[in-house]
Each structure stands twice: as structure tokens, then as C-alpha cells.
């Protein structure tokens, strides 16, 4: 049992207060609950006057809050549009750079890859899963170790099948099984 519960139990035992019975409901200070219901007409008038004074301020603050939210939404929309323009500008920059570097001999990069195909780190080099596995098996037949194969794939810029991380000897070992 936790220390908190032990302390709580020892405090209840040492306080000497009897526990309330569970057979009925216990409503402490019932007389206090009825006091607030018995407001005089003067108190009601004062309360009504205070509420009427506060309502215009509350309405003005709500309007100001709504206006601020509208301005925030407009600013977020502008930021989003600006980000789109920046990305388009970067894309145009790299398109123009490709034209300068490669001219008409620009490599063709397809937007869709065949199933299980991976794109190398160098532009335009693609390797299907089958080609990578065939390369691994042929290197194993020539006697290359798993570590050597992993290093070769890294050096060639061939990405892993998930496209994340690097090739490791353990990954090559698993593929050879």
C-alpha cells in the first residue's frame, strides 16, 4: 500500500471524527445553501445593475477577440501561400539549374516508380528489388562477405529498400537467407 494511503488511514483513525453513515445521503451545511436563495429585492436590483454594466464590456471584448482570430487566420493563410511560392521558386531554380548543367540531355525522371523499385542517390539510376538481390547473390557466389557487399552498395549509392538508412552486413545476411 502506498505511503499516501497509509497516512490517510492513520489520520482518519487519529482524528476521532466518526465517519458518516452510508445508509443515507449527507448534505453538510444545508442552511447555507438556502441563505443564497433568500436575496432581498435590493440585492437583486444591485446584481442586475452590475450585470447590465458588464454586458457591453463583455460584448466588446468578444467582438475584439473574434476580430483577432480573423486576423490570425488571414495571417496563417498568407504564410501558407508564401510557403507554396517559396517551394515553387526552389523547384524552378533546380529546373533551370538542370537545364544549364545538362541542356537537352537532361535525365528523364519519372514521377512514378515501378513496384519495389528504388531510386539511387545519383540522378536517374534506378534499381529494382530483384536487381539488387541478384547483385547481392552474384557477389556472394564470387566470395564477397556481407560487410563487403554492404559497403559496395553504399559506395554505388544504391538505397535500401525502405529508402532510409544504410546497408549493413546483417541486412545483406537476412536477404541471402
Image: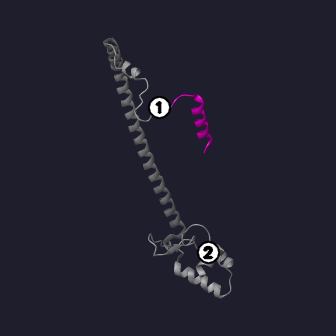
**Residue 120, numbered circle:** none
Asked whether residue 10 is drawn in magenta, I would say yes
**Disc with the residue nearer the chain's start (2 vs 1):** 1
Q: Nearer the viewer, mark 2 or mark 1?
A: 1
Res 111 → quadrant = bottom left
Estimate the x, y position of residue 47 in percent, counting from the top left: 35, 17
**Residue 20, numbered circle:** 1
Estimate the x, y position of residue 97 in percent, counting from the top left: 53, 63
Estimate the x, y position of residue 27 in percent, counting from the top left: 41, 28
- Residue bearing mark 2: 171
Estimate the x, y position of residue 85 in percent, counting from the top left: 45, 52
Of 17 and 76, which appears nearest the observer? Answer: 17
Asked whether residue 65 is drawn in magenta, I would say no
Which contiguous range is marked in magenta?
1-18
Residue under the point 43% across and 23% down:
29
User: Outermost residue toward the top?
Assistant: 42
Residue under the point 66% across and 88% down:
142
In terms of secondary structure, what is the magenta stretch mainly?
helix
Res 123 → quadrant = bottom right
Q: Secondary structure at mark 1?
A: loop
Question: Is residue 61 shown left or right of residue 173?
Answer: left
Res 41 → quadrant = top left
Amino acid at each position: 500500500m502506498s505511503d499516501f494511503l497509509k497516512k490517510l488511514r492513520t489520520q482518519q483513525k487519529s482524528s476521532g471524527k466518526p465517519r458518516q453513515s452510508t445508509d443515507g445521503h449527507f448534505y453538510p451545511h444545508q442552511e447555507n445553501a438556502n441563505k443564497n436563495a433568500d436575496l432581498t429585492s435590493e440585492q437583486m436590483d444591485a446584481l442586475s445593475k452590475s450585470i447590465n454594466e458588464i454586458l457591453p464590456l463583455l460584448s466588446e471584448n468578444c467582438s475584439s477577440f473574434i476580430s483577432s482570430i480573423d486576423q490570425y487566420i488571414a495571417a496563417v493563410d498568407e504564410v501558407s501561400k508564401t510557403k507554396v511560392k517559396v517551394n515553387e521558386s526552389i523547384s524552378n531554380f533546380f529546373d533551370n539549374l538542370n537545364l544549364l548543367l545538362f541542356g537537352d540531355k537532361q535525365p528523364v525522371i519519372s514521377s512514378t516508380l515501378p513496384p519495389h523499385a528504388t531510386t539511387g542517390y545519383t540522378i536517374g539510376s534506378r534499381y529494382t528489388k530483384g536487381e539488387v538481390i541478384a547483385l547481392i547473390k552474384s557477389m556472394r557466389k564470387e566470395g564477397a562477405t556481407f560487410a563487403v557487399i554492404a559497403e559496395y552498395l553504399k559506395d554505388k549509392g544504391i538505397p535500401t529498400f525502405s529508402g532510409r538508412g544504410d546497408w549493413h552486413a546483417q541486412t545483406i545476411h537476412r536477404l541471402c537467407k
